[in-house]
């Protein structure tokens, strides 16, 4: 049961790579951006609160995203204990119907787009302590600035995301520089940071990431 953060600037390919890694290594993929877009699409109270913030390219509040992660960690745990699973486990281990079950093994998780501020890093540490998890590694996908700008503009041509437009893109990169880049230093100090070159094609970056992931999962 590992916890791995996939870190990168907007346009670095975090979302694409996190999906590929989750499929290949059977990981749970938690993307705060996707969770927030889901809330907006469903028109929930939270969605209505964050829509304008996201459209401007600002970061939403730390408490909101940490709350979403905390909820997802609880939900993942319950989902594993479906009825069929529980019966099978009881029979296999010879546990009586009314006896307590042992703790279930928890799956490994890849975090995409979170944490994005140093405050979120600190809140995540606190959350992990409460949930008896620990952060294993942070993988940073490194892409030069000019390539990032080029990629986000290309994506804007085909994306239906309301935050993929000229002005918002510029602001998202500013937010990254001022609030999110310090996250790298935070993890560098703790020796958990691994940097992967993400300047090439999706498949090239993916094979580099797969090697790193194999190593993390085995160690
Ligand atoms: P993403 O899909 O990761 O690019 O996120 C899209 C938008 O959702 C960001 O521009 C922010 O407005 C918001 N968002 C996603 N994750 C976070 C986070 N960890 N902290 C604050 N805002 C976030």
Image (cartoon, helix red, strand yellow):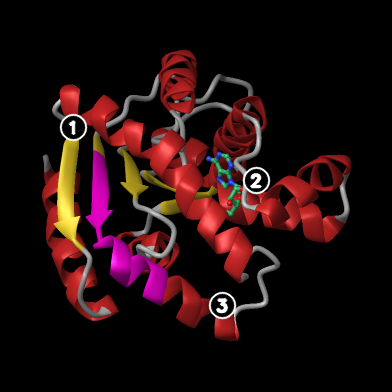
Q: Residue at x 67, y 31 (%)?
A: 64
Is 136 placed above or below 143 here? above
Q: Establish whether ligand 1 lies closer than 8 Å to the Cβ of label 2.
A: no
- The answer to which of 93 and 172 lies nearer the viewer is 172
Read off the residue under disc 2.
83
Q: Earlier in the sequence, mark 3 or mark 2?
A: 2
Is 182 placed above or below 143 here? above
Hey, which residue is sitting farthest bottom in the picture? 158
What is the span of residues highlighted in magenta in the rendered image?
138-150
Q: Along the horizontal axis of the image, is 176 left or right of 7? A: right
- Residue 82 spot, x, y in % from top left: 62, 46
Q: Establish whether ligand 1 lies closer than 8 Å to the Cβ of label 1.
A: no
Read off the residue under disc 3.
156
Based on the displayed image, in which of its 4 quarters is residue 160 positioned? bottom right
Read off the residue under disc 1.
192
- Residue 33 spot, x, y in % from top left: 58, 52
């Amino acid at each position: 049961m590992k916890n791995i953060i996939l870190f990168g600037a907007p346009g670095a390919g975090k979302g694409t790579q996190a999906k590929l890694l989750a499929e290949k290594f059977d990981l749970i993929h938690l993307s705060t951006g996707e969770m927030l877009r889901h809330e907006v699409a469903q028109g929930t109270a939270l969605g209505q609160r964050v829509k304008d913030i996201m459209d401007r390219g600002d970061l939403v509040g730390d408490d909101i995203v940490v709350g979403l992660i905390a909820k997802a960690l609880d939900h993942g745990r319950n989902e594993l204990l479906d009825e069929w699973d529980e019966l099978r486990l009881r029979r296999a281990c010879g546990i009586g119907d009314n006896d307590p079950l042992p703790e279930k093994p928890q799956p490994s998780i890849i975090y995409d787009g979170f944490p994005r501020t140093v405050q979120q890093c600190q809140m995540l540490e606190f959350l992990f302590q409460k949930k008896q998890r620990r952060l294993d590694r942070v993988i940073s996908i490194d892409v030069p600035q000019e390539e990032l700008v080029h990629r986000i503009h290309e994506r804007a041509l085909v994306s239906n995301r309301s935050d993929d437009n000229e002005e918002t893109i510029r602001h998202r990169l500013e937010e990254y520089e001022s609030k999110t880049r310090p996250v790298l230093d935070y993890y560098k100090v703790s020796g958990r940071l691994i940097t992967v070159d993400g300047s090439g094609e999706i498949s090239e970056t993916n094979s580099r990431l797969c090697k790193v992931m194999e190593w993390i999962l085995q160690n």
